[in-house]
Image: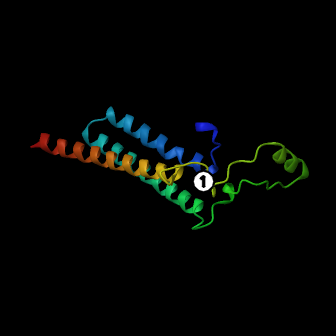
């Protein structure tokens, strides 16, 4: 983990839109015009989903709203054996605590800004692909 920081559940979930964005962008490189534009549009949508998830996470960190049950980080065992196992293992990171910040923004906030930038790049690439296809058709 980066800098020894244990990721919370929302941090882990925020990785999936990045994976989808990257995969769709790479796939778009091998596709013809309209299909490439569609793939880049989907990559942009995945990045926007990541930005939305990051925004939700920032709200949880700032205590604007409650997090999900998966974010609580404390033991929630149903049996004594399960409770013992959870207590012996390190508690997962909490989603409502800022573990790292830079220039006053948490890692979730930086992730949201990165996701918005990726969405903009994907939209721009899709638009350029569409315009290039129109100019070739004329």
In the rendered view, does 51 fall on the left or right side of 61? Answer: left
User: Does residue 50 appear in this view?
Assistant: no
Residue appearing at x 35%, y 43% in the figure:
39
Residue appearing at x 76%, y 54% in the figure:
74
Tag 1 secondary structure: loop
Q: Position of residue 111 (x, y in %)?
A: 48, 49
Label 1: how many Cα within 10 Å (few below 14, some 14–19, many 20+): some
Q: Position of residue 129 (x, y in %)?
A: 24, 42
The figure's colour scheme reads rainbow
User: Does residue 98 appear in this view?
Assistant: yes
Classify the position of the C terminus by image quarter. top left
Residue appearing at x 34%, y 37% in the figure:
28
User: Based on the displayed image, in which of its 4 quarters is residue 125 positioned?
Assistant: top left
- Residue projecting furthest to the front: 103
Q: Position of residue 75 (x, y in %)?
A: 79, 54
Instruction: Give the answer, above or below, for where 69 lies relative to 31.
Output: below
User: Based on the displayed image, in which of its 4 quarters is residue 61 positioned?
Assistant: bottom right
Q: Which residue is mark 1?
A: 98
Q: Nearer the viewer, residue 93 or 44?
A: 93
Residue appearing at x 50%, y 54% in the figure:
104
């Amino acid at each position: 983990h980066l800098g020894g920081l244990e990721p919370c559940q929302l941090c882990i979930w925020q990785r999936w839109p990045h994976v989808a964005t990257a995969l769709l962008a790479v796939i778009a490189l091998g596709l013809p015009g309209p299909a490439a534009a569609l793939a880049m549009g989907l990559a942009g949508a995945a990045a926007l989903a990541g930005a939305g998830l990051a925004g939700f996470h920032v709200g949880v960190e700032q205590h604007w709203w409650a997090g999900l049950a998966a974010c609580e980080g404390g033991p929630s065992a149903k049996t004594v054996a399960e409770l013992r196992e959870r207590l012996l293992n390190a508690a997962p990171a909490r989603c409502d605590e800022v573990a790292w910040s830079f220039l006053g923004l948490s890692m979730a906030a930086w992730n949201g800004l990165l996701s918005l930038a990726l969405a903009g790049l994907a939209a721009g690439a899709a638009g350029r692909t569409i315009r290039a296809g129109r100019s070739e058709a004329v």
